[in-house]
Each structure stands twice: as C-alpha cells, then as structure tokens.
Image (cartoon, rainbow, N blue to C red):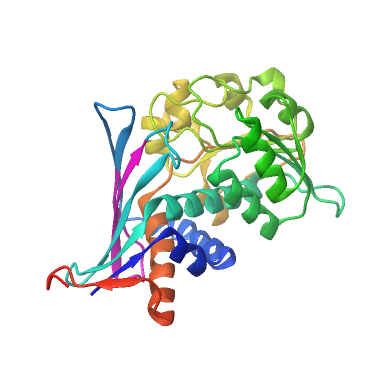
C-alpha cells in the first residue's frame, strides 16, 4: 500500500525539532558520503522549469526518495511537485508526499542550521537581530528553526510585495524595511530567499562581523549577492562544492568550487572551524541535496504509519 501525504498531513506530522535533528545527523554523515545524489534541471516551453532530485539516500534508512518539482515563479505556490518514497529492498512505493511542503521545511531548517553554525553569537542574552529578504515559505522555516537554536531579539523584513512582508511580520513579529540594503544595515544575520537574478546586496551594504545566508541561488541565472561579498567572506560555506559551482552561489558569481572554504557538513563535524573571529563576514550558500528530502520524508512517513494519517491506495491492485 502507498500512503498519500498532503500539505495538511505534513504540517500535522512534521516537528521542527525532530527535523532539525535529522538534518544535522545527515550533514554530519555527509549525506551518506558514497551515495552521491543528482540534481537534474530542464527548461520548459512554459514560464517555469522542471527539476528532479535523485536518489535521496542516508545510512540507516532502508528507503530512498525521488523528487520531481515544477518551479513557476508567478504561481502560488511557486513550487509544485511530488516526492516518491520507495522501499530499499524491493522499490515498493511507500508514500507520495507534497514536495512543496517538504522542500520548504528541509531547505529552511537546513539553512537555520547553517546560519546558526556560522553567525556570531550576540554579546548578551538579548539575542540577534535577524533580517529577512524574501518573505516566503522558506524564510518562515529559517526563522522558526533559528528561534529553536539561538535567541532572536528582533526581525527586519523586506519583500517586493509589501503585503507579503506585512503578513510575515504579523506571523513572526518585527518590522518591515523598504529595501534589502536597509535590512543589511540593521541586522546582524541576514537571510535572503528570493527569485532575484541580480545582486540584492553589494559589499558596501554589508558590515564586518555579519552573517549572510543566500537561499535563492538554487539554479543557473539566479543571484542574490555580488561577487565581492563572497570574496570578502572569511568563511564561505556551501552544502556541496561541485553543485554550488555548477548551479549555485559559486556559479552565479563565476567562482570555482575551491572558492568555498567549507561545507556545512565539515563545520558540523568540526573538520573546519567555521567562524574564527567576531569581525569576520560569513556566508552560507546552499543549493539543496537529495538526502535532505529523504530525511524529512522518512520522519513524516514513520509518524504517519504510527498515527495512521493520510490516505492509503493500492496502485498495483487498482484500489
């Protein structure tokens, strides 16, 4: 039998703390190391792109994922698709999950881990001033995750849609800013999660000691930070060097794979020290990896089985 898990089901099943723990474990395991995933992207004859991530694999999980997404920036939601969770012994289709929800959760919470690992700690117990550029679902989950990992004193939010920025403020608190530069002027931690194809921040916008997480650069042609910002970083970290150089933050600025000082896995395993001083500028630029889909899909599936949530169908039997 195959369990179908909708957005509503997933929001009931997923727990941020459990997801953060599963993602941290995956990074420490280097996503399985020997199990290299693939990210395949194709242009469409429509105003969007098709992306597949295969296979999602992790040690200790007897299953794998195949994700197929459509990205249409003008649509709401902009990302639509499905994650197929297959049994590892015989390929049985265990579950079909809404990919927009899983992707937002794994991307946002993994970014929260990277942000927490690299951003300087506030000098008192008051917490950080966090800036958000792009007030969508991924930024929602970054803020949710960060608040579980460190104190957040205040939020500054900018979005091209004033209504979306105001709605984000109403959900999370804080205030709305008129530009990305205004966000960077006041926040010690800045999270960018946009569809931008031109830099939103230049080196002149960024103060020493700040941390920037750029989430929007997950396919060719997208860019949120100018190249001098990356070159000035004391630590420039990615989730995967070859992928970042092929279609991520490095590709967007013409930098080679070796320009990344570390991966998040290396920092979480203490193979790289990460930030070494309060005045360093740090940047985290992930693309997103197939094993992250499995980490959260497996959590959701196991919990759905335990609670008997979601609809079950028999694809082979036709009922």
At x 56%, y 41%, the residue is 136
Residue 23 image offset from top left, x and y in percent: 49, 59
In the rendered structure, the answer to whether residue 9 lies left or right of residue 176 reads left
In the rendered structure, the answer to whether residue 63 lies left or right of residue 239 reads left
Whether residue 266 is visible, yes or no, is no
In the rendered structure, the answer to whether residue 217 lies left or right of residue 42 reads right
Residue 236 image offset from top left, x and y in percent: 57, 35
Residue 56 colored in magenta in the image: yes
At x 87%, y 51%, the residue is 124
Q: Main secondary structure of the magenta part?
A: strand
Residue 75 image offset from top left, x and y in percent: 42, 36
Q: Nearer the viewer, residue 276 or 149?
A: 149
Residue 232 colored in magenta in the image: no
In the rendered structure, the answer to whether residue 91 lies left or right of residue 96 reads left
Image quadrant where one finds the N terminus: bottom left
At x 62%, y 31%, the residue is 159
Residue 190 image offset from top left, x and y in percent: 67, 37
Above or below, 154 relative to 85: above
At x 48%, y 22%, the residue is 197
Report which quarter residue 71 is drawn in: top left
Report which quarter residue 313 is drawn in: bottom left
Q: Nearer the viewer, residue 264 or 202?
A: 202
Image quadrant where one finds the C terminus: bottom left
Q: Please give the range of residues in magenta.
A: 52-71
């Amino acid at each position: 039998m195959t369990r179908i898990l909708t957005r509503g089901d997933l929001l009931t099943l997923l727990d941020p703390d459990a997801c953060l723990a599963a993602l941290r474990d995956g990074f420490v395991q280097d996503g399985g190391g020997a199990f290299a995933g693939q990210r395949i992207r194709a242009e469409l004859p429509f105003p969007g792109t098709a992306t597949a991530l295969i296979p999602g694999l992790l040690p200790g999980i007897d299953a794998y994922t195949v994700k197929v997404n459509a990205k249409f920036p003008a649509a709401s939601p902009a990302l639509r698709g499905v994650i197929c969770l297959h049994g590892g012994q015989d390929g049985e289709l265990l579950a079909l999950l809404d990919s927009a929800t899983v992707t937002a959760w794994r991307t946002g919470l993994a970014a929260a881990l990277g942000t927490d690992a690299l951003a300087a700690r506030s000098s008192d117990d008051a917490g950080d001033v966090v800036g958000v550029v792009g007030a969508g679902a991924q930024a929602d989950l970054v803020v949710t995750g960060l608040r579980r990992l460190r104190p957040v004193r205040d939020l500054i939010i900018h979005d091209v849609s004033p209504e979306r920025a105001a709605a984000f403020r109403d959900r999370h608190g804080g205030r709305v800013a008129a530009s990305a530069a205004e966000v960077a002027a006041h926040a010690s931690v800045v999270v960018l999660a946009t569809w931008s194809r031109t830099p939103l921040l230049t080196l002149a916008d960024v103060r020493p000691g700040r941390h920037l997480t750029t989430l929007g650069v997950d396919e060719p042609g997208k860019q949120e930070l100018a190249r001098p910002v990356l070159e000035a970083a004391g630590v420039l970290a990615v989730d995967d060097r070859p992928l970042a150089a092929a279609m991520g933050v490095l590709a967007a600025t013409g930098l080679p794979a070796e320009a990344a000082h570390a991966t998040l896995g290396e920092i979480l395993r203490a193979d790289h020290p990460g930030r070494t001083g309060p005045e360093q500028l740090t940047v985290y630029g992930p693309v997103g990896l197939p094993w992250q889909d499995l980490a959260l899909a497996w959590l959701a599936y196991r919990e759905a089985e335990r609670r008997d949530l979601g609809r079950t169908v028999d694809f082979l039997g036709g009922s």
